Image (tube, helix red, strand yellow):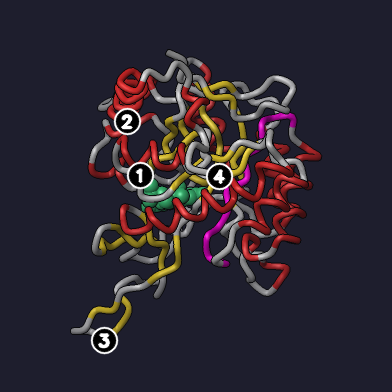
Amino acid sequence: MNLQTELAPHHKSGLLLRNPVITAAGTFSYGIEYAKIAEIQRLGAIICKGTTLHARSGNAQPRTVETSSGMLNAIGLQNPGVRTVIKRYASIWETWQVPVIVNIAGETTSEFAQLAETLEGVAGVAGIEVNVSCPNVLEGGAVFGASAEAVAGVTAAVRRVTTLPLIVKLSPNSGDARPTALAAASAGADAISLINTITGMLIDIETRQPVLANGTGGLSGPAVKPIALHMVYEVARELRSSHPHVPIIGIGGITNTKDALEFIMAGASAIQIGTVNFVNPHAGVEIIEGIEEFLRREGVEDIGEIVGAAL
Ligand SMILES: Cc1cc2nc3c(=O)[nH]c(=O)nc-3n(C[C@H](O)[C@H](O)[C@H](O)COP(=O)(O)O)c2cc1C
């Protein structure tokens, strides 16, 4: 049975995963900590916490809170900065069998390009995932991911300076991810991932104030799954004729094998798991085993046969 998934079919060296299960940015740290408790080398890939040009301490506490069937977070991209990430972790990643993809976040298009330049040629880095769900300081704080033009600009700027496989991770907050998916694919993305978190809030009725110090946060977990699945389905339908060689990576509320298979049938060549890692660090391996069992039961030889089955 073949579970292998090529995430960058048009890239010169490609990004071949041994299976389609990836851990999502911000929910698996740098992989190092989880390596102590889970069989991380069995995963298809690991995406590390989003990194920025300079160190960030993130937002004030409280910055996470549980909701009905999910969580809200407003971490604010806490990380030690890209150079420190490389210094601390890349030589460890290099020894791993599981590929590590670095998630990057910039405040300007030029920052995204500088981040990609810094990662160029670093052994242990298998690819870049561009997080466009960040405010563009030169455009009055409007989120890059809300505008197809801005997504095209960031994608093209990163593409110009990197030889690494390039994934562009879309925001769901404009309601329709198709225009930004098309923009990213046309500007040179090797693959598209979606969704990032959906903006939401909770109010504490005793203090009569928002629970999160930041006011709002990003909703993730099972609560977002049907929305994410629909967005992946719509993007897959949009890209299949114009960009059939740009794989889609489905993200949003996946907690078990059935969820993962739904995203694959909606058109995702691979999936990412986020919030579930906080409750079950073995979820990734369990989903890989569950997919294998499903394919065996259904007599399917190659996972590619069911990608987009529902389209
Ligand atoms: C605590 C937390 C931190 C996150 N940090 C990042 C990040 O740094 N960069 C990014 O692109 N997405 C980040 N995300 C979004 C996830 O990667 C994922 O897209 C989202 O949570 C939806 O998937 P899920 O429902 O499986 O968690 C974060 C999510 C959570 C819950």
Q: Is residue 165 magenta?
A: yes
Which residue in the structure is indicated by mark 3? 208
Instruction: Decide if ligand 1 comes within 8 Å of the CB at mark 1.
Output: yes
Q: Of helix, strand and loop, which one carries label 3? A: loop
N-terminal label among 2 and 4: 4
- Check disc 2 and give the amino acid type: Ile
Which residue in the structure is indicated by mark 1? 254
Quote the CA–CA distance across marks 1 and 2: 10 Å
- Which is more foreground, mark 1 or mark 3? 1
Mark identifier at residue 193: 4
Contact between labelled residues 3 and 1, with CB atoms less than 8 Å apart: no
The extreme left residue here reads 206
Mark identifier at residue 287: 2
Per the rendered image, the range of residues in magenta is 163-174
Q: Position of residue 30 (x, y in %)?
A: 43, 35
Q: Is residue 184 magenta?
A: no
Q: Residue at x 46, y 37 (%)?
A: 264
Q: Position of residue 240 (x, y in %)?
A: 65, 42
Contact between labelled residues 2 and 1, with CB atoms less than 8 Å apart: yes
- Which is more foreground, mark 3 or mark 2? 2
Quote the CA–CA distance across marks 1 and 4: 14 Å
